Image: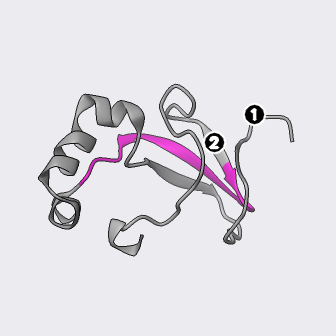
Amino acid sequence: WAPAGDQLFVDFDLRPTNAPPGTRLAVGEAVLEVSELPHRPCVKFRDRYGDAAFRFLGSPRGLELSLRGVNATIVGAGVVRPGDEIRKLDEVQ
């Protein structure tokens, strides 16, 4: 997974219908806010995974599915450990 260049890998529905920009997510003790800026594949991604993957993930459908993930800002610092739960803050704890 390291060549993907991502900082966190999560098992969570990151599509805009579930986690639109502004959504706050708790990951371990940290709080992240989903950015308006979509997470698009870059040239390094294309070089590692090929042109077809690059084109699909950067397409409107690929962005709609958020298969490349999302950009997020840390709005509450905290420790994040492997296996920590990720959840929307507005969900019942």
Q: Secondary structure at mark 1?
A: loop
Q: Position of residue 7 (x, y in %)?
A: 48, 66
Please say whether residue 37 is one of the residues in the magenta stretch.
Answer: yes
- Tell me the number on the disc at residue 18: none
The region drawn magenta spans 26-41
Q: Position of residue 42 (x, y in %)?
A: 21, 57
Residue located beneath label 2 in the image: 24
Cβ atoms at labels 1 and 2 below 8 Å apart: yes
Lateral position of residue 4 relative to residue 22, left or right = left
Lateral position of residue 17 relative to residue 56, left or right = right
- Distance between the alpha carbons at the discs numbered 1 and 2: 8 Å
Q: Main secondary structure of the magenta part?
A: strand
Q: Secondary structure at mark 2?
A: strand
Identified at 35% across, 41% down, the residue is 38
Please say whether residue 73 is one of the residues in the magenta stretch.
Answer: no
Q: Nearer the viewer, residue 49 or 69?
A: 49
Query: Tag count in the figure?
Result: 2
* Label 1 or label 2, whichever comes before in sequence order: 2
Q: Could you tell me which quadrant the C terminus lies in?
A: top right
Furthest-right residue in this view: 93
Q: Position of residue 45 (x, y in %)?
A: 23, 61
Residue type for callout 2: Arg
Residue located beneath label 1 in the image: 90
Identified at 51% across, 31% down, the residue is 20
Identified at 43% across, 48% down, the residue is 69
Q: Would you call the spot at circle 2 few (<14 residues within 10 Å), some (14-19), or many (20 or more)?
A: many
Q: Is 38 rendered above or below residue 1?
A: above
Q: Position of residue 22 (x, y in %)?
A: 55, 35
Q: Is 88 rendered above or below residue 84?
A: above
